[in-house]
Amino acid sequence: MEHNIKGKDLTKEPPRSPKTRVGGYVILGRTLDKCRALLGGNIGEYHFDCPLDNMLFGWKGITGDDFKAAVAKGASDDEMAKWVDARGTQKTAEQKEAWCKEKLAFNFNDVPEKREWYAEQLKPLGLEPATTPLFDWLEKDDEVSYQVAV
């Protein structure tokens, strides 16, 4: 049985920061916001099952399609965190924390083939590629995008 999915209207407000933890996972809150917006028809310029979402999906060994099917049943944030915990590759609390810390520090400037692209993305926002982790860029981009839109 499918439920009427309620979530953020991403044409009017950004998804949660990728730093926001749900069930101890970074990225999960943002992924849930985008998935619910996709199911609700108001995802705007965002993308679900994108490379960011797949950092989590790939690490846990789950798929975007399976995740979306669970969200479509009306699962809460807490229920989805438990769903992620129970699916794919089992992880200890220590592994989860280490993965979160790694993702919080991830910077495309450290990836030679992405360095130039990353610098181009950050330049309009006045951010320094060498010192701006991915999640900080996404937060700033959301902030600037919605200031302009309002």
Image (cartoon, rainbow, N blue to C red):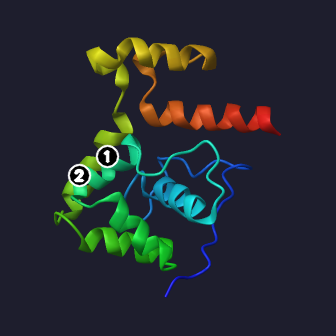
Which mark, by number, is residue 59? 2
Are the residues at dot 1 and dot 2 in contact (C-beta closer than 8 Å)? yes
Where disc 2 sits, the SS reads: helix
Q: Nearer the viewer, residue 75 or 91?
A: 75
Q: Amino acid at mark 1?
A: Met
What whole-number distance in Å separates the C-alpha atoms at marks 1 and 2?
6 Å
Q: Is 37 situated left or right of 105 in this image?
A: right
Neighbour tally class for label 2: few under 14, some 14-19, many 20 plus, Cα within 10 Å: some
- Residue 15 lies, in percent from the top left, at 59, 51
Q: Amino acid at mark 2?
A: Trp
- Residue 116 lies, in percent from the top left, at 40, 11
Q: Which residue is mark 1?
A: 55
What residue is rendered at 31% in x and 44% in y? 101
Which quarter of the picture shows residue 39?
A: bottom right
Determine the residue located farthest toward the bottom in the rendered image.
1
* Residue 23 visible in the picture: no
What residue is rendered at 44% in x and 63% in y? 22
